[in-house]
Amino acid sequence: MNEMPRLQLNAISKRYASVAANHDVSLTVQPGEIHALLGENGAGKSTLVKIIYGSVKPDAGTVSFNGSTTHVRNPQEARALGISMVFQHFSLFETLSVAENVWLGLDKHLTLAEVTQRISAKASEYGLDIDPNRPVHTLSVGEMQRVEIIRALLTNPQLLILDEPTSVLTPQAVEKLFVVLKKLSSEGCSILYISHKLHEIRELCTACTVLRAGKVTGHCNPQNESNASLSRMMIGAEPPTLEHRAAKVGDVVLGVHQLTLPRVDQFGMNLNAVSLNVKAGEVVGIAGVSGNGQRELMYALSGEDTRADAAMVTLFGKEVGHLGPAQRRSLGVQFVPEERLGRGAVPSMGLAHNLILTRNDAISKMGWIRIKDLAKQADGIIARFKVKASGAQATAKSLSGGNLQKFIVGREIDAQPKLFIVSQPTWGVDVGAAAQIRGEILALRDAGCAVLVVSEELDELFEISDRLHVMAKGQLSPSLKRADATVSWVGEWMSGLWPTAEAMDKVVA
C-alpha cells in the first residue's frame, strides 16, 4: 500500500522479571483498517496495547504513529495524538457518575453539562444506552463496558484500541457495535481489536497478527480463515469438543420462591416475584441484557444481600434467605462473581492468600493460616486449570484477565461444591480456556452438582445449559428446555415479552 501506516511497531520487547511479555514484536495497522490481535491468555496482547497507549514503557523497540516515531509517555499523550483505548479491566472511578468519569478524559474546555449531553447523544446514536448521571458503582459489568466504549468514541480517535469489547455484551448489542466500528473504519479510523471470539474476528477484521508466548507467530486475513485454522494459529490446536450427556437430574438443591426485593439505590433494579429451582445434576442458565436484575439476584443468592424473607431462598429445603455468604458456603455453595478484581480477588494479594476469601481448608481451628498448605492448594489449581502465573505468590493483578478468571473459577470448583453459582464464566477467556471451563462445569454437573450460570453469551448458555431462563426488568421468564430454545426466541424474551408458564407448556408440548 502506498498509504502511510497509521501505526507501526518495530521490534517491541517488554520483560517482567523472568517473563518476556513481548519479544521483538512488529506489526503495521493501515488507516481505516480493523486489525485483530489474536492470542491465548497471557500471550502478551494486553501488554502490547498498553505500550501503544502509554500505560507501559517498552524495554526496546519503536512506535510510529502517522509516519512519525513517537514516545508515548502516558495515556494523556496518547489521547492527544488521537489514540483511544477501551480496557478489558475498566478504568472507572466507582464513586463518580458516568458523566464525571467521561469528563476526566476529555478536553477541559467542556462543561459537565455539555459532556452529559454528548454522552446521551452518542449513546442514542450507537444504541449503547446509559444514564450519564448514574454512579458507576451502581452499574453492572455490561453497563460499565458501554461507558468505556462511549468515552473512547467521544474523543473522535484516529486509532481505537478495543480489548475484549464484546465480552459482556448481548448479541444484539454486539451487532450494533459492529455497525459503529465499520462506520468508523469507513471514515478512516483504524481499529486494533482484541477478542477471543473467533467468529467476531472473521466477520469484522481484514488483517490479523497472532501472538504466542509474547512473540509474533503469524499474520493473516481472518476472513480467509476458519475458526479451526485460527485456533491452530493461536493455541497450536483446535479446542476440544464438549460432550454434553443427558442430565441425570436429582432433587432440588436451590429453590427461589417469589423473591421480591426493592432496589438498594435509585439506579438498581427491583426484583419482582422471581422463582426458579436448580436440581442436582443439571445446569440452569440465565440469559438477559446486563442491568436487568442479574446482579441483584446474584447478591441475594450468594448471601451478600440478606434482606429477603428466609423462606424466599432455600438450600436442600432449608430456609437460607437470611444467611450470609460464609453460612451458605458451609452448606456447599460456591460462587463466582462477575467482577474479577475487587470482588472475586484482592488485586494486591497473592493467589494463595486469595484462596482464603472463599476457602478455609488451610486455616487451623485456632485460626492460624497454614502457609505451605495454602500454597500447595494454589499450585494445584494453577496446574489443573493451566493458569499462566509465576506461582502461588503471584498477585492477582499481575495475571492477565483470562488467567485470573481461570484461577477464580478453579478455586471454587476445587472446593467440590454441591451448588455452583457462576456469573460470566468465560469473560475474556481464550477459546481453549473457555472450552476447559465449560468442560469443568459439565463435569461438575455430571458428578451431581447443581449449577446456575448467568451469562450474556447465548452461545455459551446453549452449549452448557439443560434449561434456560431469561431475565428482564427484574423478572424471570418461565423455564425453557435447551432443546426447545432458539436464539431468536430468547432474544425476543430479553425485552420482557414472554408467555405465561401455562402458555409455555402448550407451546413446547
Image (cartoon, grey):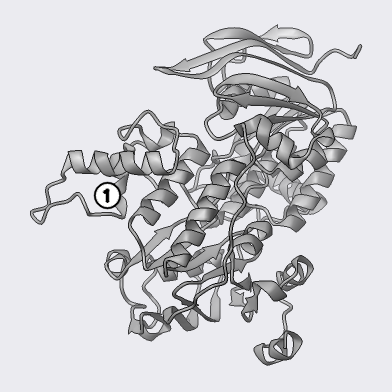
Q: Name the residue under label 1.
A: 356
Query: Residue 186 sits in which quadrant?
Result: top right
Q: Is 479 situated above or below 245?
A: below
Quarter of the image with the C terminus is bottom right
Q: State the residue in front, 257 or 102.
A: 257
Quarter of the image with the N terminus is top right
Q: Give the class, few, some or many, for how many residues have Cα within 10 Å of label 1's Cα (few <14, many ≥20).
A: some
Q: State the residue in front, 117 or 190.
A: 190
Q: Residue at horizontal 34%, vertical 60%?
A: 416
Query: Residue 156 sits in which quadrant?
Result: top right
Can the viewer see residue 341 in this picture? no
Query: Residue 65 sits in which quadrant?
Result: top right
Q: Position of residue 265 (x, y in %)?
A: 50, 66
Can the viewer see residue 249 in this picture? yes
Give left or right: position of 459 versus 358: right
Residue flagged by tag 1: what amino acid is it? Ile
Q: Where is residue 341 in the image (x, y as percent from the top left)?
A: 44, 44
Give left or right: position of 220 versus 391: right
Q: How many numbered discs sit on the rendered protein? A: 1
Which secondary structure, mark 1?
helix
Q: Is 165 situated above or below 319?
A: above
Q: Position of residue 445 (x, y in %)?
A: 47, 66
Q: Position of residue 246 (x, y in %)?
A: 57, 71
Q: Is 107 situated above or below 24?
A: below
Residue at the left extreme, as displayed? 366
Q: Residue at horizontal 49%, vertical 81%?
A: 260
Give left or right: position of 210 versus 391: right
